[in-house]
Amino acid sequence: MTNKSPDLVMKRRWLFTAIMCAVVALAFSPRESAEAAEQSAELYFTILHTNDEHSALLPHSPAVDYHQEKEDSTVGGLARLATAIEGIRNAKTEENEPVLLFNAGDFLGGSAFGWLAPQGHSAELSLLQAMGYDAVAIGNHEYDYGPDVLAQYLDGAGYPDAHEDMLLLATNTLPPDDHPLAAKGLFRRTGLFKLENGLTVGVFGLIGKDAIEVTHDTGRLEFLDQHQEAQRATAQLKDAGADVIVAITHSGVEEDKALALAVPEIDVIIGGHSHDALQEPVEQGDTLIVQAGSLGRHLGRLELAYNPETGRTRTRNHEGDHTFLIPIDGRFAPHPKIESIVREYTTLLNTYISEVTGGDFDDIMATVALSEFVLPNHPPLKETPMANFVTDAMRLVTEELTGEKVHVAIQANGSIRDSIIPGSLEHSEGEVSFYDIAEVVGLGYGGDGHAGYPIVSAYLTGEELYRLLYVAVALEVFMGDSYFLQFSGLRFRYRPAALSVIAGELYTGEGVQPADGSEGFVSLRRGDRDLYHVVTDAYVYSFLPLAAELLPHLTISPKNAAGEPIPPERMHELFVRHDDARELKVWETVITYAANQPPSEVGIPQIPDYHADTSGRIVPER
């Protein structure tokens, strides 16, 4: 073995060092080094978000399955949601990462808890405040009881002072100067959040075009162009020092995409209205669009990183293997504070229900009836068992209350919010609760100061009934599922592609109409001048004249029992009322109808098999 010279050893060491340096240089390319440097400069923050709770304070689907001490399959519930939020906040606090919590509107209007709003209680908004939301946008259902009640509702929730804790945003909404919404400053256009890590987040809130179109009552309010107001708000927030721009919108995903294209400076859109549970953000250019479904079924989690040098914002969820939507179910124990507040509002609601039903019902969780099957409200643009149950209730209960024969009842799919799902667990098997029924048909407001669409009683000629079928076909084709009309007391066949009615028949018998056969049916005749008693609700009644404006040859002129035409501005004259002048509500007819079904073996009303399926009332032909 020969000895190596010192020079050779030094050369080999130099060569080894050079090779290692090259390897290191290859391993850390300039691009990767730059990316590493960029990420090291990033500021981390998280946005939690929800939308479209619709007064769903309790776990549901169905609520009757919920049990405080036993495992159940219900979803949602604000007390559970509060626990999930608190858990993430606590974890992020340990990591020194700021958290913002936003709501994209329609926190009101849906379950029976919404009925407390006209009675002076701000249940939903007070709970969002207690849960620590930072900003909330106004959706279309916040106007279910009109802008005056909304102003009282916001005032009861502590606004305008409450803006200090939870911003209420309505950037493109313009109330008249003399209306409390404007005079008291109950809305804000924009807001800034200066986070602990030095990041400044600017926010604004929009209501979209479709949401405005389906808003029940906005009085003298104006709604400004969404894109123009977004551009203006974004510029104002940038001038005020905002690093990140967040739009909280009640518009739907498609309108959110258009907004991102029109205002690319928006970094994040927290969306609502279309009830989309987006498992991944929709990326439109550099804008991230998220939405968390509806009814508190999910908590949206958007983990973000902002780069001060590039001004770009990116998601980090996948880095921590964190989903963008967290299901809210029994894995989250109810938050004690929020659960206590929910119980207080439940007591108030039970008292209210007892008052308006004359003591017939005094517990929202009481079992009204039993059912061995689900009454579905789908598929869209079709006759459904749920719709038949609702229209039968409207026809037969109104008939019983007024003592007058009701020939036809009409309802639109937009007013039937869900299916009736009976309980499925040991403690709730087959039970249908007051709360679960009310959640399906509890929308609207009347002139008597109480929640719920009032029943409208009018008379149409046989010719107008025939025209009504053509109107129904036109609404299906041109307006979509929300305007699809459902019927009790008649049946018809039609060709949607040709906008034509093949034949229509009126049921002349008693009770529910048979599902087959011709007994008890007579053909509707063109030119028939006889009057027929028709009931609907204020919502459907309000848009029927619109169809006649589009199709003048299908003019329908609702009349009173004497045959006198009643114009839309006098619609209140046609409301069905109790002896105490309180209006008969759609929800009241449906709950009464369920409670009036024949008793089961255990003495509780049982929904009959007739309502397990459709009965050939609306038959399309190709």
Image: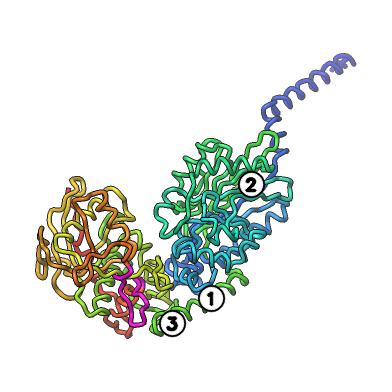
The vertical placement of 127 against 327, above or below, is below
The residue identified by callout 3 is 354
Q: Is residue 262 left or right of residue 512?
A: right
As measured in the structure, the alpha-carbon distance from the residue carrying label 2 to the one carrying label 3 is 46 Å
Q: Secondary structure at mark 3?
A: helix
The residue identified by callout 1 is 69
Q: Nearer the viewer, mark 3 or mark 1?
A: 3
Label 1 is placed on what type of residue? Glu
484 in the magenta segment: no
| Sequence-earlier tag: 3 or 1 | 1
Label 3 is placed on what type of residue? Ser
User: Which residue is at 77% across, 24% downward?
Assistant: 21
- Residue 532: percent from left, percent from top: 17, 68
580 in the magenta segment: yes
Q: Secondary structure at mark 1?
A: loop
Residue 494 in sight here: yes
Which range of residues does the magenta coloring cover? 572-587
| Sequence-earlier tag: 2 or 1 | 1
The residue identified by callout 2 is 202
